[in-house]
Image (spheres, rainbow, N blue to C red):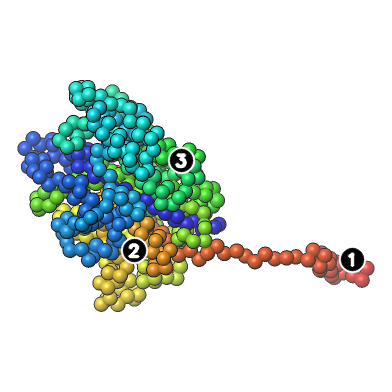
Amino acid sequence: MSNAVISGAGYVLVHAPNIMMVAGTTQLLEKENPNSEYIKRIKDHIRSYDDAIAYPPNQAYIGNISPGDLRSIKRPWYENPIKGASRFGRYGEIMPEDEFYGLMAISDVFDLVILEKEFAEGVKQKLSRHPLLSENDVNRIKMVADEETIKKHLENGAVELMYGGKLVGCVRKAHDKDETLSAHVMIENLATKASAVMALRYLLKVTGIAPTDVDYIIECSEEACGDMNQRGGGNFAKAIGEIAGCGNATGADMRGFCAGPTHALISAAALVSSGIYRNVVVVAGGATAKLGMNGRDHVNKGMPVLEDVLGGFAVLVSADDGMNPIIRLDSIGKHPIAAGAAPQAVMQNIVYNPLDRLGLKASDVDKYAPELQNPEITEPAGAGDVPRANYRMIAAIGVKRGELRKEDLDSFVEKHGVTGFAPTQGHIPSGVPIIGYAREQILAGSMKRAMIIGKGSLFLGRMTNMFDGISFIMEKNPGIQKEAAKTIDVSSYLAEAFREFAEYLETRGKVDASR
């Protein structure tokens, strides 16, 4: 089998404070309490779009600064914005919510997104200037209505779309009886689809690959579309590919909680390495349920609600070109069922076992990319700095194995760790945000290998108490290795074969070899 390579990555963030209020699980639960102090106070803690753009971790996510640059920016980062920060980055963009409503309408094929007439016209004008959207895309925004009509839909179970304090649209339910096609689920699924479409568009731009050259799409978000008869039947993958113009592709959805993207990338690499497909895209959109997940703690500590962005990404896995970083399929880390959920057992199986198979030490990996959650989001909620905790566990096992000295533990964390910078969107932080940056560094020669680590909480589904973990190494391409062609002198070959056969027969007295 040949190697599979990572040919590029695209990333997108969507500033979505209004979607947060109508679809974020924390906010929906708080609204059930009419006396909720959190709901009363949250409006004073919602960031502007400009603040979201200037927020350093968001700039790292789209590639305008490196994750390492965050170490030199004083915390709290939300009090030290990047001056002159751009909406657009090397890998993608931070999209405003009004344009995202338009993108949801573009991605909607069942007339579920309805926009107010004047608002729709304004959004169309904005999106017509977007570098990755065509006139045909913008013309897909057709379902428009006046405010009174939209209010009638709200009375019938639709979810409101607000912007600038005004009602600007709604998302309708797709069925009168089926709860899995309720308006709440529809806005959740359409937001996932639309953010994934934009991430895929950026991937196509970054890599230069034509949409029609994509053979297969694996979608790996945490949402599951279907109806009451098969709630997770899918297929987000083909739905996303349809809007992105990938007419020659097929695909399917893969789920694994936060570890889903790593499972998907390994599967993509296997499909490419086996020769089944040449270009496989792994893509995921954002999770509306996770918006404002830790908002109560942020508000209580006088912070802005930092979980106000949806995340999305897309990665292209291609046949070996002799240049792009390879995925080492000969040593995949996995957390087997029998391993148990102890942190040391998890790290041994997904970090050290694959290194041992390759004869590598912990220090031979330039960067580890486990759960890359932004610590500024998780620390106020008591979860600490999640990435740093992972690095310390890796280092501690290295010390126990005799690979590292105890006094070198902190320096190992600083050298081989990556500062957390991703939004807490479940699957989004789990390794994949570093791929674009790591690929660039490997191509530039400043990095040789990185380990992408996916970890998942399978017990959340109430079907098992188990944990999950899986990893792979992306590494500098050694170049396409070609075996030297062997030339054969056919006549000499036949003469030698006849001589050996004659000798064999002679030993049994059947013929005289001289004949």
Question: Label 3 vs label 1: CA separation?
Answer: 69 Å
- Please give the name of the residue rendered at 55% of the width and 51% of the height, measured from the top-left corner: 275
Name the residue carrying label 1: 510
Whole-percent x, y for residue 108 in the image: 34, 32
Where disc 1 sits, the SS reads loop
Give the distance between the C-alpha atoms of the residues marked 3 and 2, in whole angstroms: 32 Å
The secondary structure type at the circle numbered 2 is strand
Q: Position of residue 240 (x, y in %)?
A: 39, 39
What residue did someone put label 2 on? 368
Disc on the earlier residue, 3 or 1: 3
**Image height of 175 relative to 49, above or below:** above
Instruction: For the N terminus, give its image quadrant.
Output: bottom right
Badge nearest the viewer, 3 or 2: 3
Which mark is drawn over residue 246? Answer: 3
The structure residue drawn at horizontal position 27% and vertical position 31%, both measured from the top left corner, is 121
Q: Nearer the viewer, residue 514 or 172?
A: 172
Quadrant of the rendered image containing residue 348: bottom left
**First-in-chain label (2 vs 1):** 2
